[in-house]
Image (cartoon, rainbow, N blue to C red):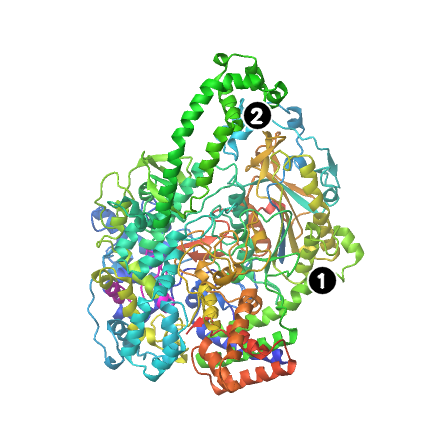
């Protein structure tokens, strides 16, 4: 086939120019300048990361699926069972807990004295051999507790949605830093020749707050940014050949483009042109691989039922199934956003039917993904993460109904697969669920742990920008070895 | 596959190898700056540098020990008498892992680095001020052998260096390439056929210079170079963060375009943007200019602490000031003393204090016509209000109580309990609130009063929609500024007054200085940084990389200039020519260095693979906006209108769903559909994908250098995006309808319009085959094969590259 021989010829050219242009032969100094040079980094082929596919540490996980519950799920309604909080329901929280602390919506705790504690009305039970507590809200999740581990003490630093999401994704509350998926692809590259290395899927009534910077590449080359896949229309923007163009003529145009580009490469000797030819070949492959990804006709009815997904209906469950398909196709980092976890109280944000709704949206799909990965042997090297940007307060927040405010000191997340223990709980909160009493896990610790499982030392994966070596974990982060197998 | 010899990426030392290792004869006298300090900075300053809190062993290596900072005894102990007796040498050279510096967990020193330090210690450890903190001196213009090649003084600096290396500069690029290059670089548009014909017929320096002058005088110069500035200004049309509401600040964008076109001296350009409102008798335009620092993001999320995000904005202003004007990473000093540069935390907050006394307001910008219309209408309203007010006073006084009494009880019951109660009371007993509620009801229902109101409303409805822009205004009541412990705004540290970093030229403004005083300090001729940083960025725009590669870090950790004398020459020239941007750019593009071929040269692979020495030009992919512009130029559809509110070229459905709020995107129709890329309305949370995919800055913080990626998504955009397809169709139609006889003529025409050159035989063959295949495949309409050609050309690397 014509394009194959082009590919071979091109790889030769790319390599030759890469060596020559980028001075690989000159040793480490040239290499480090290459790696920090954005223009040159653009010409690194898509599948080659900083570490050239080889992590520094032995990798337990090859890929990550991060199920991001945007808005901040209430750990106190779902996982962090606090009988004392129920006992003291309606009592003012002791001042010592909240002295000098910052919350969002400071004024909505009510005006008369310290905010009042709010015990959950949800029914909690222990599940599985591990005896993990899960509430009635998440029956399917309750069924997989022996395959997952809970982190009860995840703490962040910023109490507002957009900065906190950015913090979880980039390790900084400031906009403009690279996101975790971008760092990972920058560090160890992608295994997929046909799909982007970082894919973002969304469900729920709106996009997550903060938008693109949540999956942006910041100062890293744009090739590493997350690519949002859409569940209707083209899965990737501009994926389809225009209506006025047939597939054959699209291929013909790409061939002509490549031929002319090659002619210009011969004249100018600029390796950037070789990289551009590779980009066009990958774009062409994506035109068939992405629709193939989205085509669920080969999935069995029992699989669809496991997830609760219906063909033709975009949903979180569908996105979970797509996440498994992405994993099978070598995509390195997949993020699923589901919005509307912001239960302050009030009509559409209450802790009763609004919470039920969003739990129902995600419960079956999340659990099905873990089960499906496990039965296909993919769970052991796929790290699955479930959680939001922060937790919620033990105190009630008074709106039209009583809900809970944003809480940065602890939230519950769960992780599975990828070298993480199964049926384990890391950390513990106090009797009111306000602060950690054992093993606090800062977001930077979580990030360090995720990178560690991928074989990356979080202190070594750095990028020089504006005179400083930046990293995902800023100047902090400890790998949570207790959590790991 | 080759092996990666080193995993940890750190700062590029390559240049240092060129300057320090290979070419000692060319290193300027300041060996300390070029050879020693980079080692100290990289390996030692974290613990033995400016940051007092991190300093170990009471040893500080970033300051000269020679000016009384150290006792003679301590000096001898630390620096020794000859390297062997020096504590420094003993600690870096020891084999004892516990004693060895840097500590084991840090990257160690190489043997050659240790040797360099030893030689320096033997020399008595001379210190010199950091090169960038010494004001630029006028260098001698170098004498060169290759006089015939030289077109102006810039070339002498470049060629001198090449001659020492034994490298010949590249030949001039072809006339077509030079013309396309200078058009794209100066105005961001393609040269018209007539210019190509003229210049290929007479590729003389004289004609080239005339073309350059025409382009500098073109109003599109202000667009192209204004857009460079807008990157640094973090300009966008929305507020950012999660809500990302729209904002109106395009008049600032237009001010930038006008200022660049007028070649406003750069010092005035800076002063007006930082403090135009504080100038004596500030004009409206000068107030609009202060939009520069209103381009900070605004968080409209519910439940936030407004003061926190106001401070975020001020912090951004300080950091932007550092990156854009001073080329310093001031942001590092927000939380602690800078780890490398002599910038201290309290100095950060002194700069902060300059920016901490402003209100963020909107400025109405009526046109003259609108202003007079508004005056007329307001006068009309003023003609009605006194009569209305008299009527109201009399009616309330005379009728109110009786009127309420006459209202049916069931009606009043619906109004509310307070009104109901009032009905059973005398007016004298009403509370103030009852009085207010009842007056309101009465006026709502009173026919005569409603008539007055209707007349006023009708006039108000005629008031024109006046554009606004966001500006700064000095606060009447000054805020007190404090250092924030570890950058946390809830932890107030010592009080600070406005001031500037002591390492730079002195600040001699008033004690309670304002933005104007800061602006004047920035453009003070004594400032060693502003002119250098600015001309370096001009160089970067024209060569793809600055003479100082780290264009926003001229500090200790930044790269050294590849041509320090040239940088100083350009900086001094810039000031001497009255801070004229156009003259600075003119000199650069008239140089032979600029006009060289950008073709790869095998002979440079070993000596200068990254082309620091500029023995050729660089091929540079076009900026995102310009990629749009060149398709519009080639298709003939370009609407070259300058300025005005942002526009909405088509974009794929669903893009706006990616943000928290679904913002509308109704694609512009008519002429606005074909405006230049820089006018595309920029939503920070959901930027137009064709801009984002080609690395347009995200406008979160100042962008002083764009990255240039090369991705499959770019290919999909050029191949399939509706806007590019629309332009390709227009281009194809333009080709099909061109009054030409043969296919070959049309192919040549197509290449001339898009690549602005004549095709090779090989290229002709490729396109002939494409056309033949397209005709075999058939297609819609007579122009189908030419649309194929158009799409092919729009997707070429060369089309979106300035060679």
Stretch of the chain drawn in magenta: B541-570
For label 2, the SS is loop
Q: Distance between the residues labelled 1 and 2?
A: 53 Å
Does the stretch in magenta take in B377? no
Quadrant for the N terminus of chain B, please: bottom right
Q: Is residue B697 visible?
A: yes
Decide which of B681, B338 is in the foreground and name it. B681
Decide which of A330, A441 is in the foreground and name it. A330
Label 2 chain ID: A
* Residue A93's disc number: 2
Q: Do the residues labelled 1 and 2 touch (CB within 8 Å)?
A: no
The x and y percentages for residue B549 are 36, 63
Does the stretch in magenta take in B556? yes
**Disc with the residue nearer the chain's start (1 vs 2):** 2
Label 1 chain ID: A
Image-based side of A68 in relation to B357, left or right: right
The x and y percentages for residue B440 are 50, 25
Q: Is residue A221 visible?
A: no
Image-based side of A193 in relation to A19, left or right: right
Local packing at callout 1 (Cα closer than 10 Å; few below 14, some 14-19, many 20+) is few
* Residue B677's disc number: none
- Identify the residue under disc 1: A295
User: Which residue corresponds to the image point at 50% horizontal and 81% vertical from the top-left?
Assistant: A263
Image-based side of A125 in relation to B25, left or right: right
């Amino acid at each position: 086939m014509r394009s194959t021989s082009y590919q071979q010829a091109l790889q030769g050219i790319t390599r030759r120019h890469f060596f020559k242009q980028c001075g690989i032969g000159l040793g480490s100094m040239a290499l480090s300048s290459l790696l920090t040079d954005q223009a040159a980094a653009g010409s690194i082929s898509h599948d080659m990361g900083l570490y050239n596919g080889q992590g520094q540490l032995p990798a337990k996980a090859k890929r990550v699926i991060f199920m991001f519950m945007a808005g901040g799920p209430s750990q106190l309604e779902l996982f962090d069972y606090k009988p004392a909080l129920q006992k003291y329901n309606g009592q003012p929280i002791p001042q010592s807990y909240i002295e000098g602390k910052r919350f969002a919506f400071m004024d909505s705790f009510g005006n008369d004295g310290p905010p009042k504690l709010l015990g959950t009305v949800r029914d909690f039970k222990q599940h599985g051999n591990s005896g993990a507590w899960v509430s009635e809200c998440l029956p399917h999740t309750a069924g997989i507790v022996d395959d997952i581990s809970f982190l009860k003490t995840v703490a962040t630093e910023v109490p507002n949605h957009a900065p906190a999401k950015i913090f979880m994704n980039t390790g900084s509350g400031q906009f403009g830093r690279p996101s975790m998926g971008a760092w990972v692809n920058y560090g160890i590259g992608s295994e997929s020749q046909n799909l982007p290395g970082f894919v973002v899927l969304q469900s729920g009534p709106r996009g997550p707050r903060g938008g693109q910077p949540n999956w942006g590449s910041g100062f890293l080359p744009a090739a590493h940014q997350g690519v949002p896949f859409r569940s209707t229309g083209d899965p990737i923007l501009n994926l389809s050949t225009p209506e006025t163009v047939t597939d054959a003529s699209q291929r013909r145009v790409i061939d002509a483009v490549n031929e002319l580009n090659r002619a210009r490469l011969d004249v100018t000797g600029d390796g950037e042109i070789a990289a551009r030819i590779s980009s066009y070949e990958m774009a062409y492959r994506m035109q068939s691989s992405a629709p193939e990804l989205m085509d669920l006709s080969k999935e069995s009815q029992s699989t669809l039922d496991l997830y609760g997904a219906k063909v033709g209906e975009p949903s979180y469950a569908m996105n979970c199934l797509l996440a498994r398909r992405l994993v099978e196709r070598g995509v390195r980092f997949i993020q699923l956003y589901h919005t509307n976890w912001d239960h302050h109280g009030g009509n559409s944000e209450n802790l009763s039917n609004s919470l039920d709704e969003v739990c129902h949206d995600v419960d079956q799909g999340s659990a099905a993904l873990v089960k499906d990965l496990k039965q296909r042997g993919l769970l052991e090297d796929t790290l699955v993460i479930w959680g939001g940007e922060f937790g919620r307060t033990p105190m009630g927040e008074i709106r039209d109904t009583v809900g809970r405010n944003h809480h940065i000191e602890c939230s519950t997340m769960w992780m599975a697969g990828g070298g993480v223990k199964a049926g384990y709980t890391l950390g513990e909160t106090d009797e009111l669920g306000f602060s950690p009493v054992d093993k606090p896990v800062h977001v930077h610790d979580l990030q360090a742990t995720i990178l560690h499982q991928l074989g990356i030392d979080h202190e070594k994966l750095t990028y020089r920008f504006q005179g400083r070596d930046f990293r995902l974990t800023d100047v902090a982060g400890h790998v949570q070895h207790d959590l790991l197998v | 596959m080759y092996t990666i010899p080193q995993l940890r990426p750190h700062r590029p030392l390559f240049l240092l190898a060129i300057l320090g290792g290979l070419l000692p004869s060319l290193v300027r006298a300041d060996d300390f700056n070029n050879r020693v300090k980079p080692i100290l900075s990289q390996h030692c300053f974290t613990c033995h540098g400016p940051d007092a809190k991190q300093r170990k062993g009471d040893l500080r290596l970033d300051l000269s020990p020679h000016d009384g900072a150290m006792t003679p005894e301590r000096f001898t102990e630390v620096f020794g008498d000859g390297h062997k007796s020096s504590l420094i040498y003993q600690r870096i050279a020891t084999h004892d892992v516990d004693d060895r510096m840097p500590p084991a967990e840090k990257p160690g020193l190489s043997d050659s680095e240790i040797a360099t330090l030893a030689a320096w210690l033997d020399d008595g450890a001379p210190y010199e001020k950091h090169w960038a903190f010494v004001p630029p001196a006028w260098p001698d213009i170098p004498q060169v052998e290759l006089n015939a090649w030289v077109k102006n003084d810039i070339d002498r600096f470049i060629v001198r260096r090449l001659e020492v290396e034994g490298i010949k500069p590249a030949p001039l690029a072809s006339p077509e390439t030079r013309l396309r290059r200078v058009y794209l670089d100066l105005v961001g548009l393609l040269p018209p056929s007539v210019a190509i014909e003229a210049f290929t017929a007479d590729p003389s320096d004289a004609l080239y210079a005339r073309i350059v002058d025409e382009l500098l005088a073109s109003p599109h110069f202000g667009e192209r170079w204004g857009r460079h500035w807008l990157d640094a200004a973090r300009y966008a049309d929305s507020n950012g963060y999660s809500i990302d509401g729209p904002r109106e600040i395009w008049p600032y964008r237009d001010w930038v375009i006008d200022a660049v076109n007028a070649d406003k001296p750069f010092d005035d350009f800076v002063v007006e943007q930082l403090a135009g409102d504080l100038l004596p008798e500030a004009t409206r335009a000068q107030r609009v200019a202060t939009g520069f620092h209103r381009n900070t993001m605004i968080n409209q999320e519910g439940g936030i602490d407004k003061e926190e995000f106001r401070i975020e904005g001020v912090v951004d202003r300080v950091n932007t000031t550092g990156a854009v004007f001073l080329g310093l990473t001031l942001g590092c000093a927000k939380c602690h003393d800078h780890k490398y540069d002599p910038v201290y935390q309290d100095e950060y907050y002194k700069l902060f204090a300059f920016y901490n006394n402003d209100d963020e307001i909107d400025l109405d910008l009526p046109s003259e016509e609108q202003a007079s219309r508004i005056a007329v209408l307001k006068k009309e309203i003023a003609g009605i209000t006194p009569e209305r007010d008299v009527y109201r006073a009399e009616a309330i006084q005379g009728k109110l109580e009786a009127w309420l009494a006459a209202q049916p009880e069931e009606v009043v019951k619906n109004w509310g309990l307070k009104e109901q109660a009032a009905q059973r009371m005398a007016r004298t007993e009403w509370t103030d609130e009852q009085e207010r509620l009842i007056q309101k009801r009465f006026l709502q229902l009173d026919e005569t009063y409603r008539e007055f109101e209707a007349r006023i409303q009708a006039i108000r409805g005629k008031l024109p929609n006046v554009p606004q822009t966001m500006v700064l205004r000095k606060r009447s009541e000054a805020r007190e500024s404090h250092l924030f412990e570890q950058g946390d705004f809830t932890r107030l540290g010592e009080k600070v007054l406005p001031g500037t970093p002591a390492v730079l030229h002195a600040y001699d403004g008033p004690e309670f200085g304002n933005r104007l005083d800061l602006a004047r300090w920035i453009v003070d001729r004594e400032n060693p940084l502003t002119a250098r940083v600015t001309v370096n960025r001009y160089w970067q725009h024209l060569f793809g990389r600055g003479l100082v590669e780290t264009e926003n870090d001229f500090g200790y950790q930044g790269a050294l200039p590849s041509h320090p004398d040239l940088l100083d020459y350009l900086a001094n020239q810039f000031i001497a020519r009255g801070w004229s941007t156009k003259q600075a750019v003119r000199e650069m593009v008239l140089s032979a260095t600029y006009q060289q071929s950008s073709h790869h040269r095998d002979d440079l692979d070993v000596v200068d693979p990254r082309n620091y020495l500029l023995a050729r030009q660089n091929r540079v992919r076009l900026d995102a906006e310009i990629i749009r512009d060149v398709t519009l130029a080639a298709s003939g559809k370009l609407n070259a209108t300058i300025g005005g509110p942002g526009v909405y070229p088509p974009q794929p459905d669903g893009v706006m769903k990616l943000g928290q709020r679904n913002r509308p995107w109704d694609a512009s129709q008519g002429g606005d559909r074909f405006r230049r890329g820089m006018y595309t309305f920029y939503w920070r949370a959901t930027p137009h994908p064709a801009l984002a995919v080609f690395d347009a800055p995200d406008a979160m913080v100042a962008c002083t250098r764009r990255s240039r990626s090369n991705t499959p998504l770019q290919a999909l955009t050029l191949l399939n995006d509706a806007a590019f397809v629309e332009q390709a169709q227009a281009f194809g139609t333009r080709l099909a309808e061109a009054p030409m006889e043969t296919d070959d003529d049309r192919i040549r025409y197509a290449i001339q319009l898009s690549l602005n050159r004549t095709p090779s035989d090989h290229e002709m063959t490729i396109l002939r085959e494409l056309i033949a295949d397209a005709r075999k495949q058939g297609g819609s309409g007579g122009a189908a094969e030419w649309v194929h050609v158009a799409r092919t050309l729009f997707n070429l690397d060369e089309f979106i590259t300035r060679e």
